[in-house]
Image (tube, helix red, strand yellow):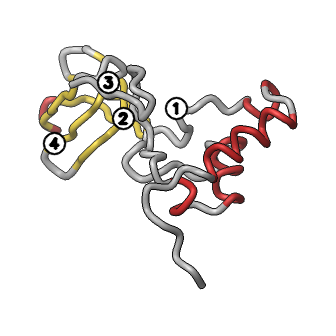
Amino acid sequence: MREVSRDRRPRRIPGPDLTDAGVTRSLNQLRESLLEPNKRIAEGFEAVSVTMRDGTHLRGIAKNHDNYSIQLLDSAGKLHLVARADTGKIEISERSLMPDDFARRLTAEETRDVLAFLSRQAVRQREKK
């Protein structure tokens, strides 16, 4: 499985779909997601580390998990279906896989540009209130 971003460049770890970011998220939500990604991790994008009973380690994003299995999407885009009975330890991280230093790496102008770009991403029309 190969994930491709909206501009057709391959991406290693898929993140939330930003196609409608300007419609589905407020400017404050976009700013928080960019500058404080650990504050609120989008559902379905929790980082997971799995240690198998044989000592093998897997790391990626938990796509589905229940009492019997966990589906993990690794950084290469490979989906692993793991039976919980075969696992030794499963750790769901409270930290986002997104870098958390954009507030330091981006200038104020670059931050405004990124937020302006994201806020204009809309396939659907905005609802008028």
Q: CA distance from mark 4 to mark 2?
A: 14 Å
Give neighbour class at mark 2: few <14, some 14-19, many 20+ (Cα, 10 Å). Answer: many
Please tell me which of labels 4 and 2 falls first in the chain.
Answer: 2
Residue sitting at the far bottom: 129
Which-is-in-front pick, marks 1 and 4? 1
126 relative position to 1: left or right: right
Counting residues from the start of the chain, the first of labels 1 and 2 encountered is: 2
Q: Earlier in the sequence, mark 2 or mark 3?
A: 2
Amino acid tagged 4: Ser
Determine which residue is flagged by label 1. 97
Which comes before the other along the chain, label 1 or label 4? 4
Q: Is residue 3 left or right of residue 79?
A: right
Residue 125 lies, with reference to residue 70, above or below; the image says below
Write down the residue under mark 3.
74
As helix, strand or loop, the secondary structure at mark 4 comes to: strand
Q: Are marks 2 and 3 in contact (CB under 8 Å)?
A: no
Name which residue type carries label 3: Asp
Tell me which corner region of the image, top left, top right, bottom left or bottom right, holds residue 36.
top right
In-front residue for pair 115/47: 115
- The amino acid marked with disc number 1 is Leu
* Circle 4 or circle 2, nearest the eye: 2
Q: Are marks 4 and 2 in contact (CB under 8 Å)?
A: no
Q: Looking at the image, which residue is at 69% across and 51% down?
A: 32
Q: Decide if residue 73 is on the left or right side of residue 23.
A: left
In the image shown, does 114 or 14 lie closer to the viewer? 114
x and y percentages locating residue 75 in the rendered image = 37, 21
Name which of mark 4 and mark 3 comes first in the sequence.
4
Q: Is the N terminus in the top left, top right, bottom left or bottom right quadrant? A: top left
Residue 69: mark: 4
Q: Position of residue 72 (x, y in %)?
A: 27, 33
Report which residue position mark 2 lands on: 61
